[in-house]
Image: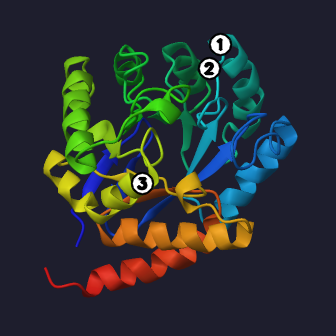
Amino acid sequence: MRKLYFWKLKQREIRLGERTILMGVLNVTPDSFSDGGKYSDPDRAYARAIELEEEGADIIDIGAESTRPGSARISAAEEIRRLIPVLKRLRDKLSVPISVDTYKSEVAERAMDLGAEIINDPSCLTFEPDLAKTVSQYDAGLILNHMRGSPETWAKLGPMPDPIATVGRDLDATINRARRAGLDKARMVIDPGLGFGKRKEQNAAILARLSELNGLDLPIMVGPSRKSFLAHPDPEETKFASAGAVTAAVLNGAHIVRVHDVREMRAATDVADEILRCKPE
């Protein structure tokens, strides 16, 4: 069985480990790799967030800056411009917590002022180390997502000789940095960052050896959904490939999975959870 954790957020605690928690993805970007532009209108984004909750999402993760391979960075002002109307519409309308996908302290601060309870940092504190301090001041949760390099440089990165050991070492260093900034360990979740500067075979190796991250003694999130290493020409086939990767992640110890297709992935995680419960201790 997975180890039980109580993830402390400002308004609540989330119990992690009894069943897989689903984080539903809502991109309000014009250029994300899978649904760019689809929800950049605040009314459509609002409707989609409500729909994600109805489909079974336990957390809604809103992103206003794309981190697809090759994407360029945007200013904090532009990111805030995209986010604010959506967060204002959603305030007090959801019963599940809102997470905001950003590495910028300024954006995180505005988002938490408007009710976001989790910051999902795609850069693992490598772009803005001060982010941990900001999150700590708001008593929010922080997801540390492992990233190698930056989206602009991923195509040029060399191979990782031992992907899971490298990810584990880097995450350990980041956890220590966040704690020195005053963030309680009970507020952190780690993510090995599938696709964030890793090649196809490296992502498979990370999933296969995910349980080796248990030594860091933090809940684990994995986001395989629609990643390029799972892509098929037919989107339906990509959905099935995502379900396969989600199931592998759960069976190897993921507490949370970040997904686009909540209803379908809930069906997959229900089966994986049942199998986990039958595993001998």
- Residue under label 2, please give it: 73
Q: Name the kind of residue labelled 1 in the image.
A: Ser
Q: Name the kind of residue labelled 2 in the image.
A: Arg
Is residue 19 visible from the viewing direction of this image? no
Instruction: Report which quarter residue 101 is drawn in.
Output: top right
Q: Is residue 69 above or below residue 12?
A: above
Instruction: Report which quarter residue 167 is drawn in.
Output: top left
Q: Relative to 249, is 169 on the left or the right? A: left
Q: Is residue 276 above or below residue 4?
A: below
- Residue at position x 58%, y 19% in the image: 107
Q: Which quadrant would the N terminus be assigned to in this image? A: bottom left
Residue 70 in the image, given as x and y percentages of width and height: 61, 31
Q: At numbered mark 2, what does the secondary structure look like: helix, strand or loop?
A: loop
Q: Nearer the viewer, mark 1 or mark 2?
A: 2
Q: At numbered mark 3, what does the secondary structure look like: helix, strand or loop?
A: strand
First in sequence, mark 3 or 1: give its number: 1
Q: At numbered mark 1, what does the secondary structure look like: helix, strand or loop?
A: loop
First in sequence, mark 3 or 2: give its number: 2
Q: Tell me the number on the disc at residue 75.
A: 1
Q: Relative to 165, is 127 on the left or the right? A: right
- Residue under label 3, please give it: 222
Residue 189 in the image, given as x and y percentages of width and height: 33, 43
Disc 3 from disc 2: Cα separation: 23 Å
Residue 248 in the image, given as x and y percentages of width and height: 39, 71
Residue 25 in the image, given as x and y percentages of width and height: 62, 49
Instruction: Report which quarter residue 76 is drawn in.
Output: top right
- Residue at position x 21%, y 25% in the image: 179
